[in-house]
């Protein structure tokens, strides 16, 4: 009897002790945070290397997501009025230091080593600024550490470790993406914001719709042949009704490119919208065949790049002429006093092709630094193949620039020769320069 009482007493004491214990919180790895000169320029190589989605994490920064892990980038603080950026460290050392410190303060971490994370497959060359972990309950995790945070807001808290390095704990919300950039649909976010690549406001991701938007084109004839006016009507893919509303993309509701079949004539124009919803433009076209490329974003839809081949009224030539030949080799043009040099190395299909344009004053040879924004971008690039079956309208990624270089990174689908037109603005004038590039797969 005495033994039973003793055992019962021990069980009760154990139960009381267990009730007073606080469960050790467990954090999961959330992101590595890098401080760089140009966060936007880091997104494409990181996304390509990890095959992840470019994203914006509200309150934390821009970066690349792989499953539930992130590489995030913030701008370096180099202005004299700002606090100097902390000395960055190697990612593996920073991770190990953070894990040791958190465990000493009663918090478990998963995974235990950076090599076991998804992002460790390919890390940026830059040193990491700090490591962050996610908590189901941010307040509980902070209380468990029993250390005052260096800084704290509704979504994150930072702590300075004895080594001087920073570890961050963020609230684990993992909300679904609801917004994206109309020009860069790979940039997504659960909340409103601006695209780190082009600065455009993010818009709601529309529901999936079947079919493609249609553009009806009407050309008004000239008395001496050709056309004098264009009229475009955009139609809904499901109802076939005229589209009622558009969102401005790069300051216009519709961008129209007009390219002659011989690839000699090029125009980038912006028709005005009439009372009936159609877009109209006075524009003289000589008799011939033309490719019309309409770039627009219908309200509630996705960005569209719709192609239409048209023949002017009275044209009696062949509608199936052979594709024009394109000559590769010219890499420098002088237009309106601006010398533009194209640099496109190692061009291959189905991957981002860095195409850089270096610009100098044609009379002095001095690199130009007075480029102006053109329709909300440092420049525009249109690329087509000689069969006029492929067309890409691109803008520079990364920070806006006044020169002397502007870089694009189009992805072209196949080997072959492509004609491109680069457009920049200087002293109020839009300057257009044509070039030809050739893509050739490596022979193994």
Image: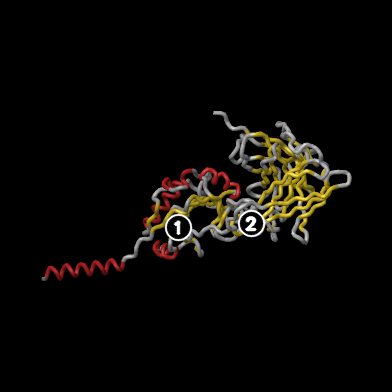
Q: Nearer the viewer, residue 257 or 132?
A: 257
Q: Mark 1 and mark 2 in contact (Cβ < 8 Å)?
A: no
Q: Tell me, yes or no, if residue 408 can be seen here.
A: yes
Q: Nearer the viewer, residue 356 or 55?
A: 55
For image coordinates 60% across by 41% down, the residue present is: 352
Instruction: Indicate the position of residue 400 as horizontal and vertical percent values.
Output: 67, 50
Residue at the top extreme, as displayed: 444
Instruction: Indicate the position of residue 147 as horizontal and vertical percent values.
Output: 42, 62
Colour scheme in the image? secondary structure
Give the mark toward the camera: 2 or 1: 2
User: Is residue 401 shown above or below 22?
Assistant: above
Q: Residues within 10 Å of mark 2 (few under 14, many from 20)?
A: few
For image coordinates 31% across by 68% down, the residue present is: 20
Residue at the left extreme, as displayed: 1
Sequence-wise first label, 2 or 1:
1
Question: Dot 2 corresponds to which residue?
Answer: 238
Measured Cα–Cα span from mark 2 to mark 1: 43 Å
Quadrant in which the N terminus appears: bottom left
**Callout 1 secondary element:** strand
Q: Which mark is residue 134?
A: 1
């Amino acid at each position: 009897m005495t033994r039973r009482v003793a055992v019962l007493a021990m069980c009760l004491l154990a139960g009381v002790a267990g009730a007073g214990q606080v469960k050790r919180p467990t954090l999961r790895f959330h992101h590595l945070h890098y401080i760089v000169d140009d966060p936007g320029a880091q997104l494409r190589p990181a996304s390509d290397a990890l095959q992840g989605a470019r994203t914006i994490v509200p309150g934390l920064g821009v970066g690349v997501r792989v499953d539930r892990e992130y590489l995030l980038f913030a701008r370096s603080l180099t202005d004299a009025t700002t606090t100097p950026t902390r000395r960055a460290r190697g990612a593996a050392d920073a991770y190990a230091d953070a894990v040791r410190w958190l465990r000493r303060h009663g918090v478990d971490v998963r995974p235990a080593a950076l090599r076991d994370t998804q992002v460790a497959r390919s890390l940026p060359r830059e040193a990491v600024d700090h490591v962050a972990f996610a908590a189901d309950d941010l307040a509980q995790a902070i209380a468990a550490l029993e250390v005052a945070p260096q800084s704290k807001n509704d979504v994150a808290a930072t702590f300075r470790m004895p080594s001087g390095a920073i570890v961050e704990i963020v609230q684990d919300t993992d909300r679904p993406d609801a917004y994206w950039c109309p020009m860069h649909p790979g940039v997504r976010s659960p909340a409103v914001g601006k695209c780190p690549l082009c600065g455009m406001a993010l818009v709601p991701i529309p529901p999936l719709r079947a079919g493609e938007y249609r553009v009806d084109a009407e050309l008004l004839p000239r008395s001496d042949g050709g056309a004098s006016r264009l009229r475009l009507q955009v139609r809904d893919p499901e109802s076939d009704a005229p589209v009622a509303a558009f969102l401005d993309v790069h300051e216009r509701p519709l961008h129209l490119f007009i390219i002659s079949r011989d690839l000699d004539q090029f125009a980038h124009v912006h028709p005005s919208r009439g009372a009936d919803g159609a877009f109209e433009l006075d524009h003289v076209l000589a008799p011939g065949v033309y490719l019309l490329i309409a770039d627009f974003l219908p309200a509630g839809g996705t960005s569209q790049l719709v192609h239409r081949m048209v023949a002017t009224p009275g044209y009696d030539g062949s509608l199936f002429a052979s594709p024009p030949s394109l000559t590769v080799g010219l890499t420098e043009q002088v237009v309106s006093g601006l010398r533009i040099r194209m640099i496109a190395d190692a061009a291959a299909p189905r991957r981002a092709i860095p195409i850089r344009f270096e610009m100098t004053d044609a009379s002095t040879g001095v690199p130009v630094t007075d480029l102006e924004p053109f329709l909300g971008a440092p420049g525009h690039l249109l690329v087509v193949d000689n069969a006029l079956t492929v067309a890409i309208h691109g803008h520079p990624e990364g920070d806006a620039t006044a020169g002397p270089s502007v870089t694009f990174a189009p992805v072209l689908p196949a080997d072959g020769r492509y004609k491109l037109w680069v457009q920049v603005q200087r002293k109020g004038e839009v300057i257009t320069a044509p070039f030809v590039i050739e893509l050739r797969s490596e022979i193994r």
